[in-house]
Image: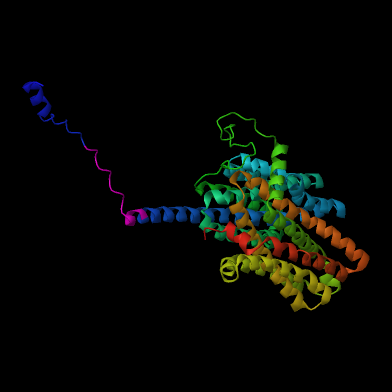
Amino acid sequence: MSDQAVQTAEAPAPAAAPTPSPSPAPPPPPAAAQTSKTSKTSLREGGRGTRNSVVLLVFTAVTNLADGVTKVVLPLLATAASGSPAQVTSVSLTLSLPWLLVALHVGVLVDRVDRRRLLWGANALRLLAIGALIQVALSDGITIGVLCAVGATLGVAEVVALTAASALIPSVVPPAGRERANAWITGAETVCNEFCGPFFGGLLLAAGTGIALGTTWVAYLAAALVLVLLTGRFRAVRQHSDGDDGGSGDGGSGVPQPRESVNQQIRGGLRYLWQQRMLRTMALILTVLCACWGAWLALLPLFATQAMHLTSHQYGTVLSALGIGGLLGAVAVTWLNRAFSRRWVMFADLVGTFGMMAVPALTTQLWAVTAAAFAGGMGGTVWAVNARTIGQRLVPDDMLGRYNAVARLFSWGAMPIGAGLIGLLAEWFGMRTAFLVFAAATALTVVPFLRMVTPAALAEVFDDE
């Protein structure tokens, strides 16, 4: 080997060009900053949820107050237009019949359309119906046909408004505030629709038909304007594989898919409810409980006058106890859930409804029937609040409209059935036996409730609490 080769072999290799080192990653933000950001987000969401809860509360209170007024005004106008009991009762029937006829279709609509716009649409129907009735009243042209048409329109509007408002809560109120929002809204529905509305309706009608109808029209308009203050998302977000993708038509896969028909979506909603064991059990139990409520409200006036020999003031005391119990339940439901657990608080409705039906079968003492009415009213409210909260946590957003529609179809639809059935039982076997039959029906719901609404099932629903 030559000296030059040796020198070349022994010569040190030239230094490689320096490789630029990568820039260091920015340090993660301190835990305190992350916590501060999370706290600010939670506070912002909490503030928005409280604001939306108040808006929905005001809307519900005002519209239910106006609904309560119309439920007194329309039948009284019917008595002036006709002396036929069948024609007069047909007007009241048109107010509640839409729950049996259109509730399922309205549920599909609520899952497809902007829910705040549906609330506006419902109030627009109310304004048109009351406005037309005012014009007819001024021309002395009120007939049973006119009142039935107005009642049917108001009934459809009520179905749309209540279904859309209940489905809207999960979109505009964070989970931590939903129980409170449901309590407020349920209390407003009970107090305003069943008690304050009819009371003010009588006073307003005494001042004049035009004043009563005009005040109702203004109330519906004010409630519609309040909805402008709502913030957030108002259209259902697709979560359930039922073909309704919220308008994209791709089912979330990017491949266009045909939208399911209305009847297909109705069947999908019914099928979904049937597949959810706890929700299905709660819906069936609620059907029995609401049938009992309809029966109690239908037979109590006759029982109070003929068996208890109550004056009108004493009878009013019994009904007031029902409303006071409902209001107290709405106020105290959160505390009761924490103190006794949701399961036993909901079970209290079974006990309260059983007492409402059993006490008149056993005694005619005013204090006992009044106390049972108070317990029943309180139990009904705490059940409604918890059932709505459970449904809003379990049911996908794009299924909520159909779920709420089916649930209300069962409950509101069972009330006239219970009223008719207890009338037949009282005619054939006597009033006390009729009450006892419905008390026994309530008792039959205890075992299904305890088997399905278990602590473990509720823990899965509220696993983030």
Q: Is residue 400 above or below residue 290?
A: above
State whether residue 434 appears in this view: yes
Q: Quadrant of residue 280?
A: bottom right
Residue 25 located within the stretch drawn in magenta = yes
Q: Is residue 31 above or below residue 153?
A: below
Q: Quadrant of residue 458?
A: bottom right
Comparing 357 with 286, the one in front is: 286
Residue at x 61% of width, y 54% of height: 60
Residue placed furthest toward the right: 428
Residue at x 70% of width, y 58% of height: 282
Residue placed furthest toward the front: 1
Q: Quadrant of the N terminus?
A: top left
Magenta-highlighted residues: 21-34
Q: Main secondary structure of the magenta part?
A: loop
Residue 433 on image: x %, y % = 87, 69
Q: Is residue 305 above or below residue 274?
A: below
Residue 238 on image: x %, y % = 58, 40
Comparing 266 with 422, the one in front is: 266
Residue 156 on image: x %, y % = 71, 45
Residue 75 on image: x %, y % = 78, 54
Q: Is residue 444 above or below residue 255?
A: below
Residue 126 located within the stretch drawn in magenta = no
Q: How many marks?
A: 0
Comparing 204 with 243, the one in front is: 243
